[in-house]
Image (cartoon, rainbow, N blue to C red):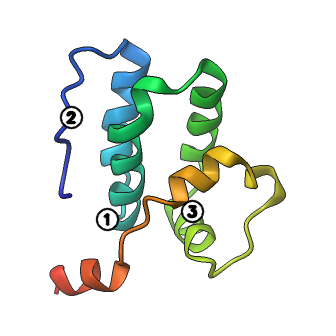
Amino acid sequence: MTGITRTSADLDPRRRRILFRSWHRGIREMDLILGQFAEAELATLSDAELDELETIMREEDNDLVRWITGEQSLPERYATPLFGRIAAYRPDFENVRQETK
């Protein structure tokens, strides 16, 4: 759970770029959420879902974490099945924070 384990060889260039960006966010929490989601589901996402994922990934990491953890209300524009699937990849952040100490 610390980095890319999936090969990108079978992915088209757009999906390869998204996979890389998912694991290289800026804060560890979002690396873990988006990285794991991308590894598991990226190959099967439709073009419309890829568009939505790229829109979500343009948001600030701190905002995404707050929305996923429920610390802040999720904006209506992201109350979608795809965002719910992404949020389901949320690890136990207390364990992550302890590992980095």
* Residue neighbourhood size for the residue with mark 3, other residues' Cα within 10 Å, grouped as few (<14), some (14–19), many (≥20): many
Name, please, the residue furthest toward the right.
76
Front-most of residues 4 and 57: 4
Looking at the rendered image, the disc whose residue lies closer to the viewer, 1 or 2, is 2
- Asked if the residue at tag 3 contacts the one at tag 1, i.e. Cβ–Cβ closer than 8 Å, the answer is no
Q: Earlier in the sequence, mark 2 or mark 3?
A: 2
Question: In the rendered structure, which amino acid carries the disc numbered 3?
Answer: Leu
Q: Is residue 15 above or below residue 91?
A: above
The residue at which mark 1 appears reads as 28
Residue 69: image x %, image y %? 55, 75
Q: Earlier in the sequence, mark 1 or mark 3?
A: 1
Is 86 left or right of 32, judged from the image as shown? right
Q: Quadrant of residue 8?
A: top left
Q: Quadrant of the image for the C terminus?
A: bottom left
Is 69 left or right of 36, judged from the image as shown? right
Residue 79: image x %, image y %? 76, 55
* Residue neighbourhood size for the residue with mark 2, other residues' Cα within 10 Å, grouped as few (<14), some (14–19), many (≥20): few
Q: Is residue 1 above or below residue 4?
A: below
What residue sits 63% from the left and 69% below the top?
Answer: 67
**What secondary structure is found at the residue carrying circle 3?**
helix
The residue at which mark 2 appears reads as 6
Residue 44 circle label: none
**What secondary structure is found at the residue carrying circle 1?**
helix
The residue at which mark 3 appears reads as 64
* Residue neighbourhood size for the residue with mark 1, other residues' Cα within 10 Å, grouped as few (<14), some (14–19), many (≥20): some
Looking at the rendered image, the disc whose residue lies closer to the viewer, 2 or 3, is 2
